[in-house]
Amino acid sequence: MKKQLLIMDMDPGVDDALALLLALRSPEIQLLGITTTAGNAPVEMTSLNAMRVLEYLNASDIPVMQGAQKPLKHRLVDALHYHGPDGLGESELPPAISPVQAIQPWDFIAHAAASNPDKITLVATGPLTNIALTLQHHPEVAHHLAGLILMGGAYGLTPYSKGNQTPYAEFNMWQDPEAAHMVFASGMNIHAIGLDISLDPTTCLYEQQLQQLQQKSAPAAAQLASKLVDYAIKHHGRCEMHDPLALAAALENMEIFGFTPKQVKITRGNGAKRGVTYALIQKKTPSLHPIYIANKVNGSRFLELFLTRITGK
Ligand code: RIB
Ligand code: CA
């Protein structure tokens, strides 16, 4: 099978870890590397958490590159209150033993893209700081990647579109709106999964799905996933699958999503509308490239994909 080449940029985070498990359990994917950013937790913690998950799945041959310490223009506001003090739902994974790589994320992404032109999909499930820094250091990457799939934003395209960091803004976009602005304006082939989709209850895990993960003799991925999901259900009533949805969008031939092309603007700075994303109704500024925003999802198809890949059943 011809493998799909992916790089994941993430801030693990419970749902980032679930997305990483899905990637590791998807045979059509070759994960070339993970770049980490500050977001849900400080970048030292998100890097160690990526390593801990890789080692737990015996995948520590996949390199981890530690990236941005903070957003481009703002101080970091983490979400450990949501993900638990360890950032991984107190899943008590063994501490990481492998080191992060010495190469900077932007140099890793640029080198990989130059060596595999138009073949690598970048999946970003945290604030877009590393992606913006990649565009700053290596502008040519915008046209060397096959595409960027990002989890972030709330675009008013479904009844579930509202903020989760403020009433109007989604966490990743709010954390670094200046980075997001640069990425949206880059001309990259971008697909976005926003809260319009990931707050749809049909895409969330509940007690019923948790029991499927807790089946006897479940593989290691399911054992870890069940701890992460159990923490989310116990603390938040359900497990919102923001980042696994973005990864699922990278799995080709999955009729799970519908996308619509829209020009997108984002409010920068630190005011009340910081990080609010607007899908413009019509072509207002000819120079602004449209991005493809998910406006439809088959929730049951997504849950089936996630659960069968993670449990192997
Ligand atoms: O708003 C949800 C997003 O912010 C997810 O990627 C979550 O992990 C956090 O990074
Ligand atoms: Ca994330």
Image (tube, grey):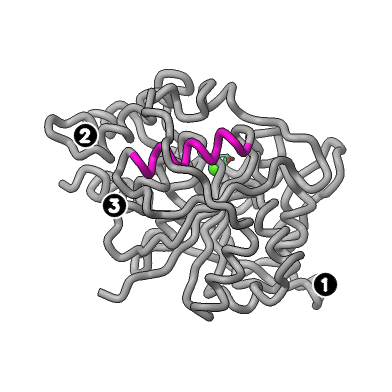
Q: Is residue 44 visible?
A: yes
Q: Which residues are magenta?
A: 43-55
Q: Earlier in the sequence, mark 2 or mark 1?
A: 2
| Ligand 2: image quarter | top right
What residue does disc 1 label? 285
Query: Judging from the image, what secondary structure is the residue with disc 2 in?
Result: helix
Tell me how far mark 1 sits from mark 3, CA to CA: 42 Å
Q: Which residue of the protein is positioned furthest toward the left in this rendering?
A: 217
Of residues 147 and 93, the one drawn nearer to the viewer in this rendering: 93
Tell me how far mark 2 sits from mark 1, CA to CA: 48 Å
Q: Is residue 202 visible?
A: no
Q: Nearer the viewer, mark 1 or mark 3?
A: 3
Residue depicted at 55% across the width and 73% down the height: 113
Residue depicted at 58% across the width and 65% down the height: 109
| Disc 3 residue type (three-letter) | Arg
Above or below, comparing residue 23 to residue 114 in the picture: above
Q: Are marks 2 and 1 in contact (CB under 8 Å)?
A: no
Query: Judging from the image, what secondary structure is the residue with disc 1 in?
Result: loop
Q: Main secondary structure of the magenta part?
A: helix
| Disc 1 residue type (three-letter) | Thr
Q: Is 207 on the left-hand or right-hand side of 80?
A: left
What residue does disc 3 label? 25
The crowding category of the residue bearing disc 3, from other C-alpha atoms within 10 Å (few below 14, some 14 to 19, many at least 20), is some
Cβ at disc 1 under 8 Å from ligand 1: no
